[in-house]
Every structure is written in C-alpha cells, then in structure tokens.
Amino acid sequence: MTRLEQAFARAKADNRAAFIPYLTAGFPDRQRFVEIASTLLDVADALELGLPFSDPLGDGPAIQRASEAALGQGITTPEVLALIRTLREQSDKPLVIMTYYNPILCYPAGEAGFVADVKAAGVDGLILPDLPPDEGESLLAAARQHQLDTIFLVAPTSTEARLRLVTAACRGFVYAVSVTGVTGVRQRLPSEVSELVRRTKAVTELPVAVGFGIADAATARPVAEVADGVVVGSALIDALATGGDVLALARAIAEGCRRS
C-alpha cells in the first residue's frame, strides 16, 4: 500500500475522515514553515503543501497573500523541495504538493524532471487544480512511471461523464470541491456536498476528500460524515498570518473529523 492508501485506511478503521491540512510552502518564512508543518504532521493524516505561484486563480485571498509573501522572500521550487526533504526526514506521513501547471511547465528539467525531483524529495502525490486530465497525458505518464499519485478536482457542476474521466486519472484520492469558486473560509457548507460525494463514489472506489470552505470543527463534522477526507487550508493560513494558535485549530478540526 502507498502512504496515502495507508492513511485513508487507518482513518476508516478509526471511524473518522482523514484530516488533511494545507500550508503554503515557505510561509510565513522557511524556518517557521518547517516548524509548523512538523507540528501539524503530529495531528494530520496527510499534509498538503502549496507550491507558491504568482497567479493562483483557484485560491482565495488568504492563500494568495501567503503565496505572494513566500515568493517575495525569494522561495523557489528547488527550495520548496529542500524543505520537503527536511519534513520527510521527520515524518513518514503522506506529503502532497498542490501546484498549478505553470510551475511544472517552466521547470528547467521539464515535466518528467519535475515529477522525478518531487518524488525523490519524498512527495507522495500532486494535486493539479488547473490541468484537465485529458490534456495532461505526458504528465500522467511520468507520474505513473515514478509511482507518484495524481489528484484532480471534481465540483458540484461536474457531469457524470466528467466525473468518470477525472476519477479515472486520479490515484491516491479524488479532491471534491465543496463549492464553485475559490478557496476560503465559509460560515456553512452547501447541501450539495453530500450529493457530490455520493455521485463521485458512484464512479470510483478511490477515497474522496472534500475541500474549500471548511473552517473549524463545526464545518468539518458534516463533511466527515459523508467524505473520506477533510482538507483545510484558508482557516489555518489565516490563523498563521494573524498570530493565531494554528495547532489548537488543527486539533479541533481533527477532532471534528471523527464520526458519530
């Protein structure tokens, strides 16, 4: 079993959804990032790491600002991979990179080199929010060659045909977007979440993790009742940016991932 398969299996055995927090790599600075990521790995089932990018169209204000701050400090993709290698030395839990396609396209060693380098750094999977799987054949081939999981997004607007196409290209898990639009904290999640999870599970046996808009234990709890994983980003980035207690928030959300 892969690390991601093991993580979801453990969570299922514990009657809970897997908790997957998100951090922007290199934010608020390199040292603090490693410290916070290491701490979160103690309570997380897997960790999603955003590769800073100058035009993150799918991200809300909190993650956009974090990405800008990291880039402003000169963070580069090779530096992010070095930070990930440090985390991999400290933990055996799954590490997943969320990246837009442009940084892969611009990578000096090309798609295949990017895949090889992130795998060598200890990364288990790639979340690809702006790459349609039917336009990513070469990247998918490289990922399969290096046994790197590929995770694509489905949304409430996805047709059954699209769900089948996207999930067929996924490995590790499927990322279900709870709402259309960008990432960010929301007071409550729409009722369409459970229907999207149901529709997705009807066409794949992969775990389904839900993200976008989950802010606390209260919003995590209903998602955990229907989904296999809960992804939380903006709320943690907000807490980190404002001096909040990130670990306390993460622990509360992890507790909210337990099913009744």
Image (spheres, rainbow, N blue to C red):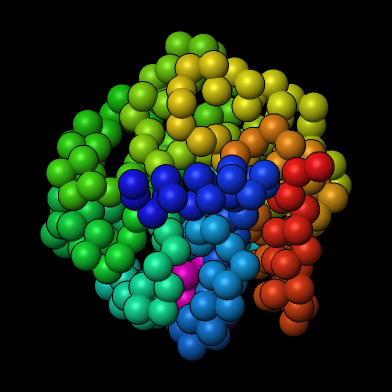
Task: State yes or no: residue 103 in magenta.
Answer: no
Percent position of residue 15, x then y: 67, 44
Q: Where residue 62 sits: x, y (%)?
A: 66, 62
| Residue 239 or residue 180, whichever sits in front | 239
Span shown in magenta: 24-28
**Is 239 left, or right, of 153 in this rendering?**
right
Can the viewer see residue 17? yes
**Magenta portion: prevailing SS class:** loop
Determine the residue positioned at 80% across, 27% down: 191
Q: Which of these two is toward me, 30 or 226?
A: 226
Left or right side of 160 for 229: right
Q: Quadrant of residue 140?
A: top left
Taking depth in this image into account, of 149 and 97 the one nearest to the observer is: 149
Quarter occupied by the C terminus: top right
> Which of the 4 image quarters holds residue 121?
bottom left
Residue 41 on image: x %, y %: 54, 70
